[in-house]
Amino acid sequence: MQDKYIDETKQGEAFAIAEKPTNSKKLFLESYGCQMNFSDSEIVASILNEQGYNTTLNQDEADLILLNTCSIREKAEQTVRMRLSQFKNLKKAKPNLTVGVLGCMAERLKTKFLEEEQLVDLVVGPDAYRDLPNLLKETDGGRDAINVILSKEETYADINPVRLGGNGVTAFVTITRGCDNMCTFCVVPFTRGRERSRDPHSIISECQDLWNSGYKEITLLGQNVDSYLWYGGGPKKDFKNATEMQKLTAVNFAQLLDMVAVAVPEMRIRFSTSNPHDMTMDVFTVMAKHKNICKYVHLPVQSGSNRILERMNRQHTREEYLDLIRKAREIVPEISFSQDMIIGFCGETEADHEKTLSLMKEVEYDYGYMFAYSERPGTPAHKKMEDDVPAEVKQRRLSEVIALQGALSRKRMESYVGREHEVLIEGTSRKNENQWKGRNSQNAVCVFDKKPGQKLGDIVTVLVYGNTQGTLLAASE
Ligand code: SAH
Ligand code: F3S
């Protein structure tokens, strides 16, 4: 199972415990949606840790319940509404319990949330988490509280996230927030606001801190990492591993990636998400230069048809996308790709759908995240286009795309068989406690028998002897 998106049909993940012995209050924090939400929840836990809250996995003992929500598709919002209704009895039994909604749904619905969901006391958008202590004073006084102000500057750069629910080996590091791309189907620019890049000094120091605390892999996160651009360089601090940075007045994503790879030379580095329109060749050059940068790019395309790409305002053509993939493979021969596809966007014909299938066959993606188009209120597509592909047609096309991706994934997995791979041990296999699970550089999940002396966080060489559609079966040396 790859975990770029936590399937919103499942329940969100409640985080493990962040303890501070002097804290007496309990926070139950559940996250839905993309990796950024999970990363944001670590910032929220950090802020609330300073306000007397330790996290708990038991909702019954919580003084404060927070859901960090996703608006990307209607189904994601429905899941949160259903989850909220489950807290009704808890609230009846415990009148002092505060229930809050964070993240994209909070931002999209604003005060409507307080009107529609009687249960909700607190609504906080993704740029307003620093205000949580004040907002909680309001709710403690029995009043509803809301802050959904979006910021052009907030990057939470100085907040040290409490690492929650993880394995102590892999971590997310946020490098940009928001998105300026305005794909016509997408609610993110409205819920997460304008794009802004975090100070590279604080990124590098977070990566170094993670290495010093035993972490072995980081994923640099942003809605669109390739448009990372930080102005205002000049020396701020003396980083022994990144002295070059002091000479720079602006830092782009390729430069940042290069600096991170140098600053933590043994840390495995991944990044997500890339946008084909903003991706530049120098990113691939940097990937090829550093052994510790994983050879994997998640490169959403959404459709294989130029007509649909234009309607989606993706700002590139099918040909440009294929050219990017071809050049990337020249520079980084062992690179793997995964995709996001939206099936049944406004005006999509059978011919457009065929183009999506043919593009997938040309690229031979390792993996894919595929969804039927879900109209989002307020987006340009909602305002200017008609959601005219019937639901059953969307579902039929979606199942064709999923079946094709299954076959392509199997083919890619087969290509790894008989070869040695370096795998980071990330935990015990869910199916067999005598086996480890981890991923190779190309992000393929790999399981293999445990051997004495091996431990979580080790990078081991394995020989792959077989595969399923999504997993490599291997033996360690
Ligand atoms: N750049 C972001 C993209 C966020 S949206 C990132 O970090 O991943 C994630 C994916 O959700 C998109 O790539 C798209 O495939 C899908 N998506 C976005 N809006 C959608 C909609 N209205 N209906 C269906 N899928 C959507
Ligand atoms: Fe959404 Fe397009 Fe940005 S998919 S997050 S508007 S790159």
Image (cartoon, rainbow, N blue to C red):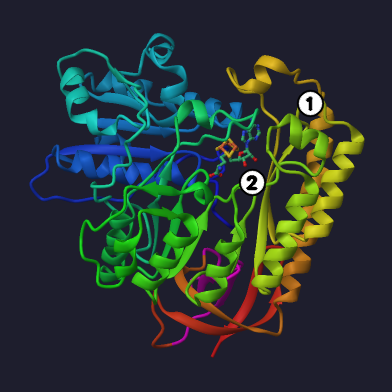
User: Which quadrant of the frame does ligand 1 lie within?
Assistant: top right
Q: Which residues are magenta?
A: 430-451
The residue singled out by tag 1 in the image is 391
Mark 1 vs 2, N-terminal side: 2
Q: Is residue 223 left or right of residue 419?
A: left
Where residue 167 appears, as percent x and y from the top left, is 38, 62
**The CB of the residue at mark 2 lies under 8 Å from ligand 2:** yes
Q: Secondary structure at mark 1?
A: helix
Ligand 1 has an atom within 8 Å of the beta carbon of the residue at disc 1: no
Farthest residue toward the left?
A: 22
Dot 2: element: loop
Q: Disc 2 marks which residue?
A: 277
Taking the magenta stretch, the answer to whether it contains residue 213 is no
Residue at left offset 46%, top offset 66%: 269
**Structural distance between the alpha carbons of marks 1 and 2:** 30 Å
| Residue depicted at 36% across the width and 42% down the height | 40
The one of 162 and 153 positioned closer to us in this rendering: 153
Kind of residue at disc 1: Ala
